[in-house]
Amino acid sequence: MRINLVGFGVIGKGFAKTLIMKRDWLKARYGFEPSVVSISDITGTLVNPDGIDLSATLETVNRTGRIIDCPGATVMQSLDAIRGVDAELMVEVTPTNVKTGEPGLSHMLAAMDVGKHVVTSNKGPLALAYKKLRATAEKKGVQFKFESSAGGAMPLINLANEVLSGDEIISIKGILNGTTNFILTKMTKEGTDFETTLKEAQELGIAETDPSYDISGSDTASKLVILTNAILGREATYSDVSVQGITKITPEAIALAKEEGFVIKLIGEVEDGSLSVAPKLVPENHPLNVDGTLNVASFTTDLAGDVTIVGRGAGAIETNSAILSDILSIYRSGAGR
Amino acid sequence: MRIELDVELKDKPGQLVKALEPISRLGGNLISVIHLRETLTKRGRVPVHIIVSLENPETLETLLTELEANDIWVAKVDEVRRKKRFTILLIGHVVDTDIRDTIDRLNNISGVLVADMSLSMPHPEKETSALMDLEISNPDKLGAALDELDLIAREKKLTLVKSLEI
């Protein structure tokens, strides 16, 4: 299977590392030999129809930060690479944008248009234009998979749609953002205030320099929209979510809740058709009470009752566990060989 | 008359005695007490299953009132659920924005009662937190109580944190 890789930041480089790490295993286990034929970033594109040397590319980009610095790379733009470099599948891992969905949205539509399967971790386009993407994929007869976009390594969409395919999922609730969970956990354990704890999280590299996307609840809301659409078969968008972040939570409030046996967690929840993200009082002994940067999601189903899964919601290699499983699922379905 | 009670105690020493004392005082004969110390309820309380024989059935109401006055929550009587309790947290200038009014507005909804409240005031000028237990005897009124809470939080610029179950 030939792959166009679009985006070569943390996740894109993690994808290259994962393929190097798993090359022999994938061949032995599934007879699967993926070949990355193009890698694009904002500076240009590297093309090799026989398969790019991923180790050499990683070495250069780790040094300079740009694809254009790799020997043989040209200023070819990502959209031209998607349209012009033959491949069966595109992996789209450019930075997410929840306002416009770009450039990911154009990349995905272009790939589908030329008959390529799409695997992505990019939340923005999914939270804004899921309906259009789904419809385009169907019209063009390609597969569209995005397990890694919500919940990182936790196999939520596949769990619900494949493993629990005989169940009706009634509600979904969980902690879908590791940064806010880290901050709230730390405030609970150490009694520190929000601002101090946020700074500490930034120093540790857990929170971004601009943390607003996480702490405002927007990231959780995007993921909730993705899960709602993919699992409950809805056509929700970001604007359907009522969103409240964690910036107003004080250490005194956390201590007061603790006295009565509760912790405060940022919970994304879809129930009875309404989507919300808000800090909630969670009983200490409840399965959704997971600490640190961990994520957790719980499905309420008609047959299985509650099913809860805990895992890592972010990280270069963890996210690529889900990307690789999407690619393998397309490969094993017989498509893209 | 044999009665089965499911009560919930605060997770603190001395609570079980507080629950049993009114039973013996009112002439009840304890048949069994199962104290489920290891399994806290969703609300962090200790569930206790009590079977008691009451000579005079009319003392049941007195007993229930006394238990609740002692902060012993009676969840079920003979498997019939009595009241639902929910916890909410308000953060902000909770006291300065007329806390009496906040409580009255909730209590004015029939079937809704602010049953318990704890406050944390780190400093008069800093934000206060109030943890409230709402007792809902009429399940149809839960929506009305939550709507009123949302309205209060908006009007008084408070942050409302609801419990997971609502």
Image (spheres, coloured by chain):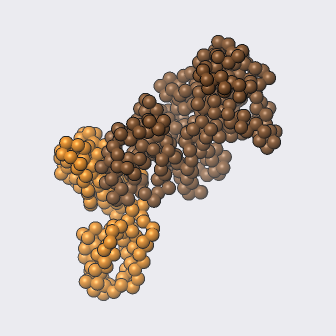
Quadrant of res A262: bottom left
Q: Does residue B109 lie above or below A16 as drawn? A: below
Residue B2: x, y in percent? 37, 83
Q: Nearer the viewer, residue A45 or A117?
A: A45
Looking at the picture, does residue B17 appear above or below residue A164?
A: below
Q: Residue at x 36, y 71 (%)?
A: B7
- Count all numbered tags in the image, as a single digit: 0
Left of A246 or right of it: where is A33?
right
Please tell me which residue is depicted at 63% across the width and 30% down the height of the picture.
Answer: A13
- x and y percentages locating residue A316 in the rendered image: 60, 36
Residue at horizontal 50%, vertical 32%?
A237
Tell me the brown chain: A
Q: Is residue B7 left or right of residue A152?
A: left
Q: Colour of chain B?
A: orange
Is A101 displayed left or right of A201 in the figure?
A: right
Image quadrant of residue B52? bottom left
